[in-house]
Amino acid sequence: MKSALWPFLPPSLRTRCELANFRDSTLLFVADSPLWAARLRHASPQILHAARQRCKIPATKLRVRVVPKPGAEDRTVCSRRLSDAAREHLRRAAETIADEELAKQLKDLAERE
């Protein structure tokens, strides 16, 4: 059944999603990120139509679960160096804030490398 639906998935989804199960007239797909899950849900009317008409799979619903691929690393935040102007703005903002904790955090941020 998995290979039967393969040609009817949008090409961009073929490497990011796969059919995991079919039970109680529901196709269960697994996507490797929320982005691809949303795209799969968006394409669900076409996928269900193809399942019923071309593959003779009596599916009426499509569900999607997000399961990151094993070994997939979390996105790392790209750290950028603050410009001198940005540092100065943070220092000035810290001087005008009454909340001592927030002012301290802004000063610390301004001093980071």
Image (cartoon, rainbow, N blue to C red):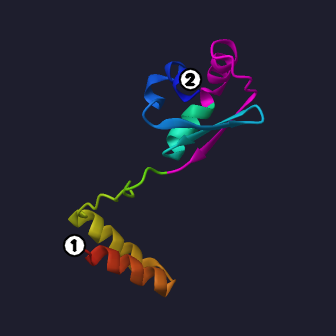
Kindly report which numbered mark, 2 or 1, lies closer to the viewer in this rendering: 2
Mark 1 residue crowding within 10 angstroms, few (<14) / some (14–19) / many (20+): few
Counting from the top left corner in percent of width and height, residue 97 is at 47, 79
- Tell me the quarter of the picture where residue 85 sits: bottom left
User: Which residue is at 25% across, 64% downward?
Assistant: 82
How many discs mark residues in the rendered view?
2
User: Which residue is at 56% across, 48% downward?
Assistant: 66
| Residue 5 relative to residue 104: left or right | right
Nearer-the-camera pick, 109 or 87: 109
What whole-number distance in Å separates the C-alpha atoms at marks 2 and 1? 52 Å
| Residue 99 relative to residue 56: left or right | left
Mark number, residue 79: none
Q: Which residues are magenta?
A: 42-67
Q: Residue lying at the far front in this picture: please name it.
A: 1
Mark 2 or mark 1: whose residue is earlier in sequence: 2
Mark 2 residue crowding within 10 angstroms, few (<14) / some (14–19) / many (20+): some
Is residue 52 a member of the stretch shown in magenta? yes
Residue type at mark 2: give it. Answer: Leu
| Residue 34 relative to residue 82: left or right | right
Give the residue pinned by disc 1.
113
Give the residue pinned by disc 2.
5
Counting from the top left corner in percent of width and height, residue 75 is at 37, 56
- Tell me the quarter of the picture where residue 50 sits: top right
Query: Is label 1 in a helix, a strand or a loop?
Result: loop
